[in-house]
Each structure stands twice: as structure tokens, then as C-alpha cells.
Image (tube, coloured by chain):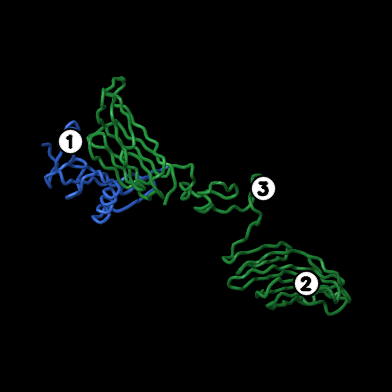
Amino acid sequence: MTRRPRESQFIAIVHDDDSLSIMEFVVVDSLGPLQLATAENVEATIAKMLREQPELRPVTRWRFIDRGDIPADRTTRSRWRDTGTAIVVR
Amino acid sequence: MLILSSTTDKIEIVTSAAVDIDWVTSYTILDLSGTPVVDGADNHTGTVAAAATTDISGSPAAATDRWNINSINLRNRHASSANDVTVRHVNSGTSRELIKVTLQAGWALVRDKEGHWFVYDAAGGVVMGQVQASDTVAGLIEIASQAEMEAGSDTSRAVAPGRLHFHPGVAKCWGMADVSANVPTLRKSYNITSITDTATGQLTVTVATDFSDAFYAVVIGSRLTATTYAVANDRKVYVRFGTQAAGSFILDCIDSTATTNLAKDPDSWNWACFGDLA
């Protein structure tokens, strides 16, 4: 049996209080292509998430990132911030 | 062999509707007036355009003639309508039914020279038996529609892989996200658009094809981060209060630290959702 390799795109989402969410946007799941990681599709997913989850803070900006851009130390998770070019711990 | 042996014998068809049926009957003529000889071969052709009984062979011209029917071809050339066709052998004024078939538009009924009957569909494929399959009878089986899958009660239709998820008893979406590295990462999922690490011990899940409403079951679990059962190592996952919507929900994970518990990441998030898709 052959399984398709998964494929996804990581996205840094900055909220209006400067807090940071990390989205994994699924491009290919185990059944095959699901969606393209276009700006339009990502914004639609973020909009859906915010519309349905009003407790999440408004989003001021987002950008595509690589998995390697995410800090290695998760104990500092609450202090992760996105500078626009890198994710740093503050 | 199918023999016409008198001047009144013939092959006829009975059609049920005013739907054009083309027919071709071919035969060999044997002359028995002296030493038996093959005296020729011929075709009869025509079209039946009404609900009627129609001679499709003609009859031997002489009492000493014998016609051997080699083949019979009947084709419904209507664009959309079916026609019930009965083929009869008339022998000395008595007709006997040979076969009765409902010919769908474009279908053909053929009797070859060996006497085998075949029905061909509009694409030229041989039509198999029309008996519906059951628990005890092999036969044709229809694919269950979305509505039939959602009703979940039909026992005579087959499930197609692409519609399995419509059955009420099947998970509509699921996922497993590993947090052993620095960020939750989906390892396996179905019908999930995205997961979002919104905070420590908090994961927002968005569904690709939404549920019809927010009333669906989320079955969740987690993987512990240690093999010891200290309160700080506990990992309890819940649907966060007030967050279950048709197309997304937030999961909370906490430990058992007294007295308010602390938000903690599990080693993995696991969830499966059951309900009705939009």
C-alpha cells in the first residue's frame, strides 16, 4: 500500500497584542491535494478561524515561514514574537 | 438451430412502445423438393416504430423450403426511451416466446448463429444479468448516494470509498498532531484544513468541509509526556468552552496541578469528530 506524503505550509500569525500563533496549513493530506497555500486561501482560513472563534485576538499580519524558523525552546512559547523576518523570544 | 418449416412459420417481435426498433434477420434457404440443396441466403430488415406485433423474417415460399435462421439483430435506436421486446417463433400458427428483454435506448438484442442471445448496451458492452444482488444472490449492485449513506439503512447498495464518510457512524474528520518538537505538527489527518498553535496547551483546529451545525461529537485524547503519574505530568484535553463551531474548535490541554491546573502541551493531540456534514 502506498501512502501519499503529507505536505503543509507553516504560517506565522501576529495578533493585535503582538502575540504569535503558528498555523500549519494543510496542502496535501493522506487522501491527496486538499488546497493550495495561496495568500487568498490562507486569509480565508484565518478569517474563518477568527469568525468562528471570537476569543482569538484580531490578526494584524501573517507571513509564510519554514518549520526551521520556529524557536526550538517551547518553554518560551508565550514570549515568541515575530519581527517580520524572524521569530524571536522576548 | 431455429427452423421455419412451413409457409406460415415466421419470427415475430412484440414491441411495447412507439420506440424505433431496427431489426435484421438473416437466414439460409434449404430446398428439400429433391436432393436437399442450399438454395440461397438472405436478410430481412426493417424498423418497428409502434407498439405492435411485427413479422421480422417472412416465411418460406414453398412447403418444401426450410429456412434456417442464422441470426437476429434488434436495436433500440431511440435517444432516450426503452422498449419491451418479445421475440416469438410462430410454428404452424402457434407462437412460442423465445425471449423478452427491455431494451434501453441504444441497446441491442442479438441471437447469433449458435443460438446464443446477448444484450449489448449503448457502448457496445455485453449487458450482464439485471438481477439485483442480495445477501444470497449475486447480481448487479448500485452505488449508494450521499443521502443513502447519511440515512444509513439501505442494505442493498454498495459503499464507494469517496462516500464512506457520509455514514453517521464514520468520523467526519480526525487528526493527530505531534508536539514532541517545538510546535504541534500534523502527522496524519483527514478533512482538516489547518491547526494553529495559539498558546501553550491550546490548539485551534479548522475543518475543511464543515459540519451542518455545531452539534457534533469531538472525541479527544492526548499522549502523556512522561511515564510517571505526577499531577504535573497529567495531560487532560478538552474542547475549550464556547469554541465548538461548525468549521472549527479549540482544544485545551491542562495538567492536574492543584488547585487551578496549568495549561500544558501534550506529547500529542488526538481527535476525531462525528456528526453531519453540511
Q: Is residue B208 left or right of residue B71?
A: left
Name the residue rendered at 37%, 35% in the picture: B220
- The disc, 2 or 3, on the residue closer to the chain's N-terminal end is 2
Name the residue rendered at 44%, 44% in the picture: B275
- Residue wearing tag 3: B137
In the rendered structure, find residue A78 and report the number of the disc placed on it: 1
Q: Position of residue A86 (x, y in %)?
A: 13, 43
Mark 2 or 3, closer to the camera: 3
The answer as to whether the residues below labels 2 and 1 share one chain is: no
* Viewer-nearest residue: B41 or B43: B43
* Viewer-nearest residue: B63 or A59: A59
Q: Chain of mark 1?
A: A
The chain displayed blue equals A
Q: Chain of mark 3?
A: B
The chain displayed green equals B
Which quadrant would the C terminus of chain A be assigned to in this image? top left
Amino acid tagged 3:
Val
